[in-house]
Amino acid sequence: MSATHCSDTAAIASVFGLVALLTGMVVFARAGDFHNGGVAAGWIVKVIVDLCVVPIGVGVHLAPYVAACQKVLSEAGLTFRLHPNGTAIEGDWAPVFAAIEGCHRALHAMGCPRIFTTVTINSRTDKQQSLDDKLDSVRSLL
């Protein structure tokens, strides 16, 4: 395999990954699928996300903005838990990321001129795992 072929394949994979991220589409591929002329069939991926949305330019009282995001998550039907520094969310990839977009839309609609968001994503394909499962596995060791 030539160096050009490897870099072309990496470029295709990068562009495909960017398109997938921007559209909320998730398709996982096995190693070699790009070399074989196609991408493996996609499937729904469960994620656990830690979300921290920070409105900027609205002062130091952020509770109304946090509440607005919590309403968006609730209306999306997602399982989530507020914690002191953000919100843990579980669900399928597309609805979770659609809700994150909804949080941004809601805060901008409230007059927030700028938002800084961090998202930590935990995805697994080997088994289903909920927020409670992750906590229970640690609690069982205490």
Image (tube, rainbow, N blue to C red):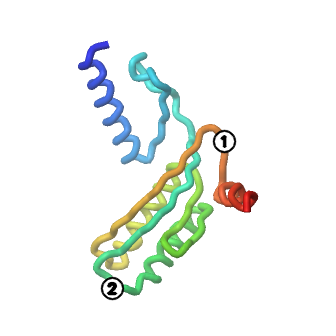
Q: Along the line of sight, which residue is nearer the eye, 135 or 82?
A: 135
Q: Is residue 46 left or right of residue 33?
A: right
Q: Residue furthest left?
A: 4
Which amino acid type is marked by label 2? Gly
Total marks in image: 2
Q: Which residue is mark 2?
A: 59
- Residue for point 67% across, 60% down: 135
Q: Residue furthest front?
A: 142
Q: Where is residue 41 drawn, in percent x and y?
A: 52, 29
- Residue for point 46% across, 83% down: 63
Element marked by disc 1? loop
Q: Where is residue 27 drawn, in percent x and y?
A: 48, 36
Q: Where is residue 78 drawn, in percent x and y?
A: 59, 61
Q: Is residue 7 left or right of residue 105?
A: left
N-terminal-most mark, 1 or 2: 2
Q: Residue furthest right?
A: 140
Binning the other alpha carbons within 10 Å of mark 1 as few (below 14), some (14 to 19) or many (20 upward) gives: few
Q: Is residue 8 left or right of residue 35?
A: left
Q: Which mark is residue 127?
A: 1
Q: Which mark is residue 69?
A: none
Query: In the rendered image of this protein, does residue 129 appear above or below residue 17?
Result: below
Q: Along the line of sight, which residue is nearer the eye, 115 or 41?
A: 115
> Mark 1 and 2 residues: CB-CB less than 8 Å, in contact?
no
Q: Where is residue 1 drawn, in percent x and y?
A: 32, 13
Q: Which part of the image, by quadrant, shows the C terminus?
A: bottom right
Mark-to-mark CA distance, 1 and 2: 42 Å
- Residue for point 52% across, 34% down: 42
Please tell me in which quadrant of the rendered image residue 132 appears. Answer: bottom right
Which amino acid type is marked by label 1? Lys
- Residue for point 28% across, 18% down: 5
